[in-house]
Amino acid sequence: MNKNYFCVIMAGGVGARFWPMSRTSQPKQFIDILGTGESLLQRTFQRFLKVCPPENIFIATNSIYRDLVKQQLPQITDSQILCEPSRRNTAPCIAYANYKIHQINPDATIVVAPSDHIIMRENDFSDVILSAMDAAAHNDWLITLGIQPCSPNTGYGYIQFDENEIYAKDNRLKKVKTFTEKPELDMAKKFLQSGDFLWNAGIFIWKLKNSMKAFKQFLPEIDELFQSGLPYYNTPEERDFIEKTYPMCKNISIDYGIMEKAENVYVLASEFGWSDLGTWGSLYEHLPKDKNQNAVIGRNVLLYGSKNCIINFPKDKLAVIQGLEDYIVAEDSGILLICRKEDEQHIRQFVADVAIEKGEKYV
C-alpha cells in the first residue's frame, strides 16, 4: 500500500434533513441509518482502508463530536482527529488538514471525502479512487469525482467536461469546463441530454503541494491563517492554536473558493452506486422495498394498505401503520415525524420551529 496516500474524511455536519434520527447531539454520519450495524462514518473509514494505511486516515469534525469519533473509530489516535471549533464549510477544513499532513509527509497525495455517502459497489469505488490518486500523484491537477447522471436531479451540482482533453492512462478522466450549482429542472434536463455533464460527488483528489498552491492563489487569507500555525501542528499546542484561529476563517466551500476558479481541474466520470444521502427520499432509493414499494427499517413495523412509504422505527418499538401512501414516518428518542415525501424540503423548517417552540433539546 502506498504510504504517500492519505485520506481526509469530513464528518462535521448536522444532517438536519434526516431529523429526528439525525440530531445535533448525534448527526447522521454517526448513525446506523441503513440498518447494517455500522454508522455511515464507520463504513466510510472501512472503505478507505483499501486506499491508504489506517494511520494516514484523518477525520475532520466539529469539536463537540470528538468523543463520538473516538467511540466509533477506536483504532485511530487523537492526532488523527481534526477538531473544528466552529463550522466554516469545507475550504478551512481542508486547509487545516493540508498543513497538518504536510508536517507528516510533504509528498502526500490526498483524497478528501464526506462521511455520509452511500457507495453500493465498494470495489468499483476503490478502483476509481486509486486511479484518481495515481493520476493526481503524477500530474499537477486538482481532481474531482463526477457521477454518471441517471435523472435530471435538481439536488446535485453539475460538472461539464471537455471531451477533447482526456487523460491517456484513464479515458474516464477529463478536463473540467464548468461547474453549475443545483440547477432548475429545465436546465438539469438539458444537461442530461447534452451528455457532457456529471453530478458533482464532492470527493476531491490531489497532490498536497498542488492543493496548498491553490489555496495560496485563490484563498490567501485562509492559507495565511493556517500557515501561521506551522510551529504547532502535531504538537500539544495545536488545539489551542486552532481554537483561536479557526473562527477567524471565511465561511466558504472548496468548490466555490478554489475548484470553480482553477484552470487545472479534471473530473473522473464514475459509476459505483453513489448517493450523497442528503434526504429521506435519497435514502428510500437505496433501501430494499416490499411488494407495495415500502422501505422499512425496524423489526416491528406492520403495514396495512400503505404504499411507497419510508418507515424508520427503533427495533424495540412497535408501529402499526394503515392507509398511508408516499409518506416518511420516522421515530427516534420519543420524537415522531410524519411527512409527505414530496414535502421533505420543509423538514429543515420543522426543525427550526421545534427549536423555537419546544426547545433545543429536541433538535
Image: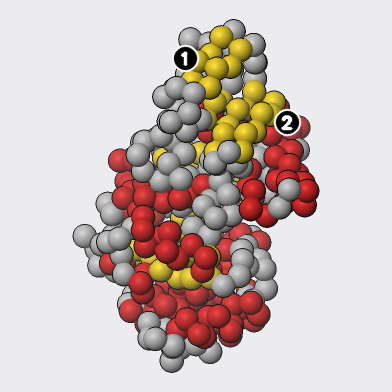
Residue 262 shows up from this direction: no
| Residue at 37% in and 62% down | 70
**Secondary structure beneath label 1:** loop
| Amino acid type, label 2 | Asp
Q: Position of residue 229 (x, y in %)?
A: 50, 87
| Residue at 35% in and 72% down | 78
Direction from residue 198 to residue 73 in the image, left or right: left
| Residue at 61% in and 70% down | 86
Q: Which residue is mark 2?
A: 343
Direction from residue 290 to residue 361 in the image, left or right: right
| Amino acid type, label 1 | Asp
Q: Which residue is mark 1?
A: 290
How busy is the neighbourhood of tag 1: few (under 14 within 10 Å), some, or many (20 plus)?
few
Query: Up-down: is 247 above or below 336?
Result: below
Q: Position of residue 60 (x, y in %)?
A: 47, 65
Query: Up-down: is 83 above or below 156?
Result: below
| Residue at 36% in and 50% down | 42
**Occupied quadrant, residue 256:** bottom right
Query: Up-down: is 227 above or below 336?
Result: below
Q: Position of residue 349 (x, y in %)?
A: 75, 44
Q: Position of residue 13 (x, y in %)?
A: 56, 56
Pointer 2 and pointer 1: residues touching (CB < 8 Å)?
no
